[in-house]
Amino acid sequence: MYLCGPTVYNYAHIGNARPAVVFDLLTRVLRRKYKLIYARNITDVDDKINQAALDADVPIDQITTKYIKAYNEDMSVLGVKSPDIEPRATEHVKEMIEMIQLLLEKNHAYEAEGHVLFDVSSNPDYGILSKRDLREMIAGARVEVAPYKSSPQDFVLWKPSSREFPGWDSPWGRGRPGWHIECSAMSKKHLGNTIDIHAGGQDLIFPHHENEIAQSTCAHDGAPFARYWVHNGFLSVGSKKMSKSLGNVLLLHDLLKVTSGEVIRLALLSAHYRQPLEWSDQTLHAATRMLDRFYGAVRLIDLTKAERQEAEPPAAVIEALEDDINTPKALAAMFHLARTLNKTDDSVERKKLGASLLAGGDLMGLIQENPDKWFGDGADGGLSVENIEMMLTEREKARSNKNFSAADAIRDRLANCGIQIEDSVEGARWRRTE
């Protein structure tokens, strides 16, 4: 499986995080049944990176090293596991040159003014992924119309580099690769001519993924490039797609300073991955409340490490995730289990249900914190977990002595601090409400 990863010239925005989280979950589901090799690339040579380096008056690798590190750290906070392979474009220029040479030899590319371009007219299947007429695709995309192109739709495989830009020696002079050839060359080197699954954002279908297919199939005499394509939908803010021009780009790095990574992960999984996702404070608030319910349900469940590792996720959760990663249905199954857990008084059944709920959380990358840590450690109205537990003990004594006014006063004080009490046969449980 191959996922188009980040172009590292700035911190990732929340839209960049959606494919990383969604397809991290897909890898978890696949690995229950298959041996998987998962590659997620790094684009570390690009005109946006070049411009960022020029603006900061620093070498290119100073920009890319900083933002590769930041990206991987931020994804880790979201519970995204590292890919098996993280190829960088700058480490695969040799493979890109070799693929371009193949395309030239097979008459699918041509040289013009120091550039090498792919001849779209040489590939009758061009447009097979996006299923749109070529003229329509050109009209709807930012296609560079340059005098050295035979046709406007032809795209760059190699371009010359001036002194201020990074460059590599090639048969066509000092230059650098085009964006599209990078992924074709990297996926071939690490996953072969044909890969099983290619993933990415919906915005990459055209032209990036369409061009990847064209390059790879033409270079490999018609061998399929990818057997299955999976694309996540757009993330919007205020019903508008994020863009710099609209000023609504939310940097994940900043958001993580004020919001739990697990809350962000659940928010990104709350809608079906192929559907648009509206991002707002309400989205995060709803995700926080969801996690409160999960953590509240398992708070008094005491499992050994072995018991947790041996537990199986609920069958309904697995079934939902194996049905095109249906996360809304999977989360609904988790909520049903949490409700059942909260209602039962049987200690053996509670432990069994709790283990299953935690296993479902492990599969989805949720419920990974210690419940006591999740609910506060001093964050709730200035009350530490120890103080809250002490107040609950005092409340229980008051109830035993039938001093209900004192018990109610303790409940009210806790409520004013954002703590809701839930009484059960095993004692009082509490959870955060604000």
Image (cartoon, rainbow, N blue to C red):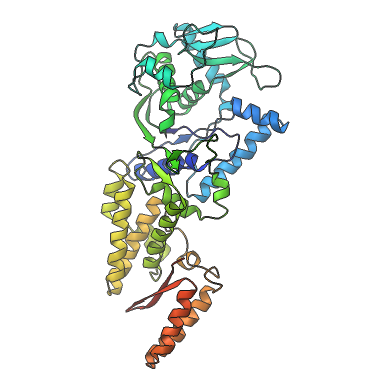
Which residue corresponds to the image point at 46% horizontal and 54% vertical from the top-left?
Answer: 263
Picture quadrant of residue 407: bottom left
Q: Position of residue 193 (x, y in %)?
A: 41, 22
Above or below, 54 relative to 278 = above
Above or below, 162 relative to 380 = above
Picture quadrant of residue 153: top left
Picture quadrant of residue 227: top left
Count the marks: 0
- Residue nearest the observer in this picture, 351 or 343: 343
Which residue corresponds to the image point at 26% horizontal and 53% vertical from the top-left?
Answer: 315
Q: Where is residue 131 in the image (x, y as percent from the top left)?
A: 32, 22
- Residue nearest the observer in this picture, 207 or 281: 281
Left or right for 213, reference 348: right
Q: Where is residue 26 in the image (x, y as percent from the top left)?
A: 37, 42
Above or below, 66 relative to 348 = above
Which residue corresponds to the image point at 44% horizontal and 57% vertical from the top-left?
Answer: 285
Residue 45 appearing in the image: no
Above or below, 141 relative to 42 = above
Return the residue found at the far bottom: 401
Q: Where is residue 74 in the image (x, y as percent from the top left)?
A: 55, 46
Return the residue found at the far right: 57
Residue 411 appearing in the image: yes
